Image: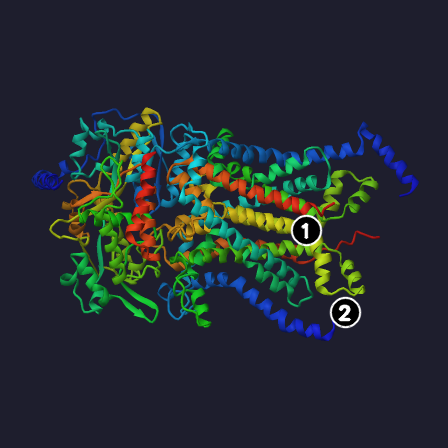
């Protein structure tokens, strides 16, 4: 495993070097339709569904307008729903044979959709490539891993988010700390900062040093996964058939979670919700918080403005970093007319064509080659930190049962943190539950 | 009834060749027909289909596979389902029984001669007016560590309670909202029922020297039976289906403390892609409510004419 | 008829109790409105700020502009009024039929209607969607209204209430030669005002609140209902608490207005003056 990672890192370096020495055009996907395939001339209407997120919605609407100008015979209908609702809406639509041409879902959901046979593989002609590996080569290594099944590419991510540590500079300074020197590199460092940054007034917590997420089990697994891998373990096997929730490494990770929380946080006291997961950090209620680059526009718009620092995810062993990347991706519905599918893939290509715009307008990092070199990336706060965490990352677990697994993990975490349950017992229960699920 | 009256009704009877009771029955069928049509098509048929799905494994996208009663067998052994059923049961009992008592008491209170009646009745009815989504959002706000509820508790010297972030308290937070929201509504229903009781019954009882408690027991309660049945059955049905508040406020957590059955059903269907299982859970839910309802109806109809 | 001591008792016990109950009922409502006028910095001030100071006048305007709330508002109003109307009419007809007439299958029909209330919508949603699709009603007002235009709750409530109305009134009208329809419309319905008002408020609220059904049946933004708009608003980055409370307050307004209109009907009692023995 370590060897492969080193090999990939080398390939990545070579790739980046190659890009830097080639012309700009070659690094980004073609902006005009590839003349190598026939674009339908009749009137076609396609439906795109995506989950609501202010800057993202605004940008996609812009793209729809632009595409209409480019292809007046194509009408793109948009449907937007909140991310919690989108899944239900999509599922019912697919169940009744309706549903969009282009769907937007978290990368881990696509395993289920692929298994149920509703995804259309990427149209090679649209992308001007002759094979799937050729398309894959345009992305950073592993960038398309979550959307590749049986060697074919089925989804393309419009964001690949690493999770890194955000630090509130003002709160650090107030505690006599310097974000440049005192930012934690390991979990032990983080815990040591607990007493300095956590402020209590009687029975009320007035400020937290650091908090893990509790507003959704999915976020909890997103943090627990890299921690487990940092101890040398994993959550799920690559084929998704075996879970390791009560392995010694996962146990160490959960115990660490508990100890960090005791030292730094106060889970009973929070303003963060599923729709505003970063709220505590934005309000200055917690000095440190783990989130992705997409949160940057939010932070800039909050009272913190640009008085913040981002460092890599804390590690157990900084020499062997393990981080996590997750993302949302576009997929195309198989049960639509052929011409609609061509247009759908072309629109997806069109949408993803300018990664620097995605970064500038929505704070979304596409795991595609060449992003780091764009002007926008250079101006994006701490872009290099985010990119570094992407490079050492494994994707969020991939499984048809990802939601159930996340819920089992969330249950274990909640019971340890809220009910003082014994981590081993909690994880044994989670493992038993997940084994039952995976057996089916 | 005078003799001329019965002659009149006999001639009416001969009208259209149908007896009066038949004509009335026809009318009764006619006026219930539209309702029946809509309910059968849009509620009953889907319900039957849901029962049918419960015998299958269905992930909403691939065609269903018939698996007999395996869903049901799995469920009774599933600790998560049992936990969810437990949570729902606690929620129903503790949000319905207090509501029955409180709403009747309040209705009796409001039935008296009071000045500024309109203001008081309007003010106490306000909980009904808030839509569910708004309700969940505002109460989440109020249950915050430094929020309104804890501030009020502090006036009585009680330490702040981590309402939504404690597996011990979260369900009670949701139950409190349930009681707050339901009481005024059923109070109004009881009030309507109370006001339908003719005043002269009470006057007659008072002349006979009956105490207010006896009047309540022997006049009010019996005559309120239809209303009481309505309140009891409705409140249980509504409580069994409560969904928006736990979903928005806690998502079922922490540690499954507020994962009521409808929420678990929803997650099983749409997050775990197990529609068959979800349908099977609904069958259990349905059976529980049905048994309760039939039992209540039997209990109450003993006294009806 | 009241003796002096009981009036005194009333003053000491009843009125404070009423005040307390009113406060409990009003508190979240007040809090929502108060917070919508607070600035974000003061939202979580400790000790709690009961009255906003300084007053923030922007929240309502900002929130309303963020999305097409006017459209959602109108949609939801239209749908809620239609569903309420349907329920009042069809529910009372059905309740009347089930309570004041005897005919074959009456008990079974009642149980059938009652049973449809017991399954949560989440489970019947997929089959219902397929049926609605057959009618061609996805993304239409019909699809949003017709499946809910009458509900077991309305039937049940009217049946129970009508059971409490003496049969003599109806019999007397029949003897007088009135047609069944006239009896229903001119004698029975006026007596049901409190129940109709109560049903109207409840149905309107449930229709206003409808979330899951509009979510899956509507893809056009122009048909979106207000609860969906609020949910969308909540998941929008940059939502500040004051705006969220403002949106919540706006979402409550129609219910409040409806309530004030109907207040008279069910707060005033009915006098069964028609009965003369």
Please provide percent x and percent y for residue A330: 29, 37
Q: Which of B200/C55 is in front?
A: B200
Quadrant of the image occupied by residue A71 = top left
Quadrant of the image occupied by residue A397 = top left
Q: Which of B260/B197 is in front?
A: B260
Q: Count neighbours of disc 2 (C-alpha within 10 A) and say few if under 14, some if 14 to 19, many if 20 or more.
A: few
Residue topped by disc 1: B225
Please provide percent x and percent y for residue B196: 72, 54
Q: Which of B290/A269 is in front?
A: B290
For the C terminus of chain B, the quadrant is top right
Label 2 or label 1, whichever lies nearer to me, is: 1
Q: Which of C115/B193 is in front?
A: C115
Task: Determine whether, in the image, residue A29 is placed left or right of residue A335.
Answer: left
Task: Determine whether, in the image, residue C4 is placed left or right of residue B233.
Answer: right
Residue C82 appears in the rendering? no
* Label placed on residue B114: none
Please tell me if label 2 and label 1 are on a single chain. no
Task: Determine whether, in the image, residue B130 is placed left or right of residue A419.
Answer: right
Residue C183 to residue B206: above or below:
above
Residue A226 to residue B218: above or below:
above
For the N terminus of chain B, the quadrant is top right
Residue topped by disc 2: C1
Q: Secondary structure at mark 2?
A: loop
Please provide percent x and percent y for residue A135: 18, 32
Please provide percent x and percent y for residue B250: 40, 53
Q: Count neighbours of disc 1 (C-alpha within 10 A) and say few if under 14, some if 14 to 19, many if 20 or more.
A: some
Q: CA distance from mark 2 to mark 1?
A: 28 Å
Residue B151 appears in the rendering? yes
Q: Residue at x 68, y 64 (%)?
A: B112
């Amino acid at each position: 495993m370590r060897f492969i990672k080193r090999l990939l890192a080398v390939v990545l370096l070579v790739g980046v070097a190659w890009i830097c020495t080639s012309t700009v055009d070659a690094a980004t996907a073609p902006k005009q339709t590839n003349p190598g395939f026939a674009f339908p001339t009749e009137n076609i209407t396609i439906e795109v569904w995506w989950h609501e997120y202010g800057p993202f919605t605004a940008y996609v609407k812009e793209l729809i307008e632009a595409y209409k100008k480019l292809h007046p015979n194509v009408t793109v209908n948009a449907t937007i729903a909140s991310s919690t609702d989108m899944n239900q809406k999509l599922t019912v639509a697919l169940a009744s044979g309706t549903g969009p041409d282009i769907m937007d879902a978290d990368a881990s959901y696509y395993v289920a959709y692929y298994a149920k046979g509703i995804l259309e593989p990427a149209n090679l002609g649209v992308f001007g490539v002759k094979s799937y590996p050729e398309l894959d080569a345009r992305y950073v290594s592993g960038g398309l891993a979550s959307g590749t099944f049986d060697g074919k590419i089925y989804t393309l991510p419009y964001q690949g988010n690493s999770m890194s540590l955000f630090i509130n500079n003002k709160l650090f300074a107030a505690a006599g700390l310097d974000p440049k020197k005192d930012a934690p590199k390991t979990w032990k460092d983080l815990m040591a900062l607990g007493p300095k940054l956590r402020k209590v007034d009687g029975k009320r917590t007035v400020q937290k040093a650091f908090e893990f997420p509790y507003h959704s089990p999915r976020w909890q697994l997103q943090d627990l996964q890299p921690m487990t891998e940092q101890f040398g373990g994993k959550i799920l096997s690559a084929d998704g058939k075996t879970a390791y929730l009560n392995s010694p490494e996962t146990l160490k990770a959960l115990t660490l979670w508990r100890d960090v929380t005791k030292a730094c946080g106060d889970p009973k006291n929070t303003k963060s919700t599923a729709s505003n997961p970063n709220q505590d950090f934005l309000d200055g209620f917690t000095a440190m918080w783990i989130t992705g680059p997409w949160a940057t526009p939010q932070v800039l718009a909050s009272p913190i403005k640009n008085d913040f620092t981002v460092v890599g995810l804390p590690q157990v062993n900084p020499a062997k970093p393990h981080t996590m990347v997750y993302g949302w991706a576009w997929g195309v519905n198989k049960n639509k007319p052929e011409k609609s599918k061509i247009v759908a893939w072309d629109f997806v290509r069109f949408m993803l064509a300018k990664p620097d715009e995605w970064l500038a307008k929505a704070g979304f990092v596409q795991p595609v080659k060449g992003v780091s070199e764009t002007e926008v990336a250079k101006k994006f706060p701490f872009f290099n930190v985010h990119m570094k965490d992407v490079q050492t990352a494994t994707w969020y677990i991939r499984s048809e049962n990802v939601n159930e697994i996340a819920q089992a993990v969330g249950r274990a975490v909640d019971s340890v943190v809220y009910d003082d349950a014994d981590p081993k017992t909690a994880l044994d229960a989670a493992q038993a539950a997940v084994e039952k699920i995976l057996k089916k | 009834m005078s003799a001329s009256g019965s002659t009149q009704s006999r001639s009416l009877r001969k009208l259209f060749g149908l007896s009066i009771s038949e004509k009335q029955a026809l009318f009764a069928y006619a006026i219930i027909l539209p309702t029946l049509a809509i309910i059968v098509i849009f509620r009953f048929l889907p319900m039957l289909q849901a029962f049918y799905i419960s015998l299958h494994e269905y992930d909403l996208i691939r065609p269903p596979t018939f698996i007999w009663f395996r869903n049901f067998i799995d469920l009774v052994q599933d600790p998560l389902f049992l936990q969810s059923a437990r949570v729902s049961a606690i929620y129903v009992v503790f949000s319905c029984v207090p509501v029955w008592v409180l709403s009747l008491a309040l209705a009796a209170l409001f039935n008296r001669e009071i000045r500024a009646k309109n203001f008081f009745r309007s003010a106490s009815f306000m909980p009904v007016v808030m839509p569910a989504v708004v309700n969940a959002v505002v109460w989440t706000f109020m249950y915050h560590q430094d929020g309104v509820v804890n501030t009020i508790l502090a006036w009585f010297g009680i330490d702040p309670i981590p309402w939504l972030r404690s597996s011990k308290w979260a369900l009670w937070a949701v139950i409190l909202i349930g009681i707050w929201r339901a009481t005024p509504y059923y109070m109004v229903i009881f009030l309507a029922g109370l006001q339908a009781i003719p005043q002269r019954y009470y006057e007659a009882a008072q002349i006979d020297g009956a105490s207010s408690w006896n009047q309540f027991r022997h006049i009010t309660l019996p005559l309120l039976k239809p209303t009481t049945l309505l309140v009891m059955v409705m409140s249980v049905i509504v409580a069994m289906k409560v969904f928006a508040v736990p979903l928005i406020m806690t998502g079922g957590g922490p540690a499954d403390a507020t994962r009521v059955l409808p929420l678990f059903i929803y997650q099983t269907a749409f997050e775990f892609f197990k529609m068959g299982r979800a349908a099977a859970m609904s069958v259990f839910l349905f059976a529980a409510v049905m048994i309760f309802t039939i039992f209540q109806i039997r209990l109450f109809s003993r006294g009806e004419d | 008829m009241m003796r002096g001591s009981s009036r005194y008792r009333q003053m000491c016990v009843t009125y404070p109790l009423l005040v307390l109950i009113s406060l409990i009922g009003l508190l979240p409502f007040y809090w929502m409105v108060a917070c919508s006028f607070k600035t974000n910095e003061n939202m979580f001030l400790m000790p709690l700020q009961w009255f906003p100071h300084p007053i923030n006048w922007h929240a309502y305007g900002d929130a309303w502009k963020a999305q097409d709330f006017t459209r959602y508002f109108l949609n939801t109003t239209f749908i809620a009024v239609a569903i309420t109307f349907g329920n009042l009419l069809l529910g009372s007809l059905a309740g009347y039929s089930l309570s004041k007439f005897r005919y074959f299958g009456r008990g079974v029909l009642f149980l059938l209607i009652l049973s449809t209330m017991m399954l949560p919508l989440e489970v019947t949603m997929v089959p219902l969607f397929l049926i609605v699709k057959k009618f061609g009603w996805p993304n239409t007002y019909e699809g949003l209204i017709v499946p809910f235009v009458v509900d077991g709750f309305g039937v049940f409530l009217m049946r129970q209430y009508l059971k409490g109305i003496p049969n003599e009134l109806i019999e007397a009208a029949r003897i007088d030669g009135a047609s069944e329809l006239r009896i229903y419309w001119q004698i029975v319905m006026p007596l049901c005002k409190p129940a109709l008002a109560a049903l109207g408020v409840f149905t309107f609220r449930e229709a206003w609140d409808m979330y899951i059904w509009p979510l899956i049946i509507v893809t056009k933004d122009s048909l979106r209902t207000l609860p969906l708009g609020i949910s969308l608003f909540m998941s929008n980055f940059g939502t500040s608490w004051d705006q969220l409370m403002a949106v919540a307050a706006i979402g409550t307004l129609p219910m409040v207005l409806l309530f004030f209109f109907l207040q008279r009907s069910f707060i005033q009692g009915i006098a069964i003056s028609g009965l003369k023995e």
